[in-house]
Each structure stands twice: as structure tokens, then as C-alpha cells.
């Protein structure tokens, strides 16, 4: 059972601080993020776009697998997630994730494609995580 790791470090207060994000594979290594890029318009990354990319990657793989398992040849599945973050009474909240997917699958009709796409919406591991994964917190205060 693989465990994948991502990490982040934030320094400073919310508006003036800055942080870096890394992954265990090193694909992301100390990639910068900050308040402006997250809640306004900036050129650094942010958790929401990373979440969107992670879900889009998972969804594309899962949909391709569903279609291939059903006997279709999949040339490509391209997915883009629009992740909306808004200030609500509870604070900043991801309120919507819109999934846009384009399938290049010869010989499939639209109804069948839609059925596989819809089934995948609730079937890919990241989709399932976004609908209520158990979160276990281990918090340690540096002494």
C-alpha cells in the first residue's frame, strides 16, 4: 500500500508570508507560493491549482482505464479542473470544482462516453478523497 508524500513550509503571517511546496519524488522542490498567488493574481503556485492538477491527472487515468476495460481504444483523455475558492462565513473555502474533460475515443457514442465519465467522477481515488476522506492529524510543536 503506497504512501505518497507532499510537504510545505510557510514562514510569516498570512498576507506577507511566503512558503515552499515539495514532493517526495522531487518533481516539485521548494516551489514558491504566497497569499497573492492564492487569493489574488500572482505568478507562483497555490494549493488549489495543485489540487486541480492532481484531480485532473487522477480523473484522466481513471476514465481512460474505465473506457479501455470496456473495450474502447483511448487515444487521449485531457482534463482541466477549475477550482473555485471563496470567502464564506466559515472562512476561505473551496466551493466548487468544475471538471472539463475531452476524450479522443474512436467508435464510442456520446451517451456511453458520458456514462463512463460520470461513473469516473465518483470513482477515481482523488474524487473519493475530495468527498470526505478521513484525515488523521499528527501535530508536533517544536521545542
Image (spheres, rainbow, N blue to C red):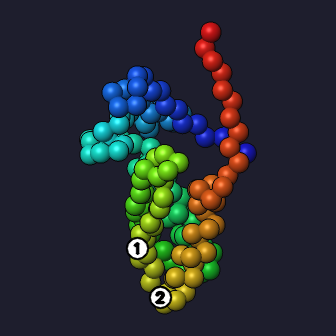
Q: Earlier in the sequence, mark 1 or mark 2?
A: 1
Residue 64 spot, x, y in % from top left: 53, 70
Q: In percent of the image, x 44 and y 44: which residue is there?
A: 47
Asked if residue 30 can be seen in this view, the reply is no
Lateral position of residue 86 relative to residue 123, left or right: left
Q: Quadrant of residue 137?
A: top right
Q: In percent of the image, x 47 and y 62: which residue is there?
A: 97
How crowded pointer 1 is (Cα within 10 Å; few <14, some 14-19, many 20+) is rated as few
Helix, strand or loop at disc 1? strand
How crowded pointer 2 is (Cα within 10 Å; few <14, some 14-19, many 20+) is rated as few
Q: Nearer the viewer, residue 111 or 98?
A: 98
- How far apart are labels 1 and 2 at the CA level? 12 Å
Asked if residue 87 can be seen in this view, the reply is yes
Find the residue positioned furthest to the front.
89
Residue 40 spot, x, y in % from top left: 29, 45
Return the residue at label 2. Answer: 110
Find the residue positioned furthest to the right.
1
Q: Tag on residue 102? A: 1
Q: Tag on residue 90? A: none
Q: In percent of the image, x 56 and y 76: which residue is there?
A: 118
Residue 2 spot, x, y in % from top left: 68, 43
Quadrant of the image containing the N terminus: top right
Amino acid at each position: 500500500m503506497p504512501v505518497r508524500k507532499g510537504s510545505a513550509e510557510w514562514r510569516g503571517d498570512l498576507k506577507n508570508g511566503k512558503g515552499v511546496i515539495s514532493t517526495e519524488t522531487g518533481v516539485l522542490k521548494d516551489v514558491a507560493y504566497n497569499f497573492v498567488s492564492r487569493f489574488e493574481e500572482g505568478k507562483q503556485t497555490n494549493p488549489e491549482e495543485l489540487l486541480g492538477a492532481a484531480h485532473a491527472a487522477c480523473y484522466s487515468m481513471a476514465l481512460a482505464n474505465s473506457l479501455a476495460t470496456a473495450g474502447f481504444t483511448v487515444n487521449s483523455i485531457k482534463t482541466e479542473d477549475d477550482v473555485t475558492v471563496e470567502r464564506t462565513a466559515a472562512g476561505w473555502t473551496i466551493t466548487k470544482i468544475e471538471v472539463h474533460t475531452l476524450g479522443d475515443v474512436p467508435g464510442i457514442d456520446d451517451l456511453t462516453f458520458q456514462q463512463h465519465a460520470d461513473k469516473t467522477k465518483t470513482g477515481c481515488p482523488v474524487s473519493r478523497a475530495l468527498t470526505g476522506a478521513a484525515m488523521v492529524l499528527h501535530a508536533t510543536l517544536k521545542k
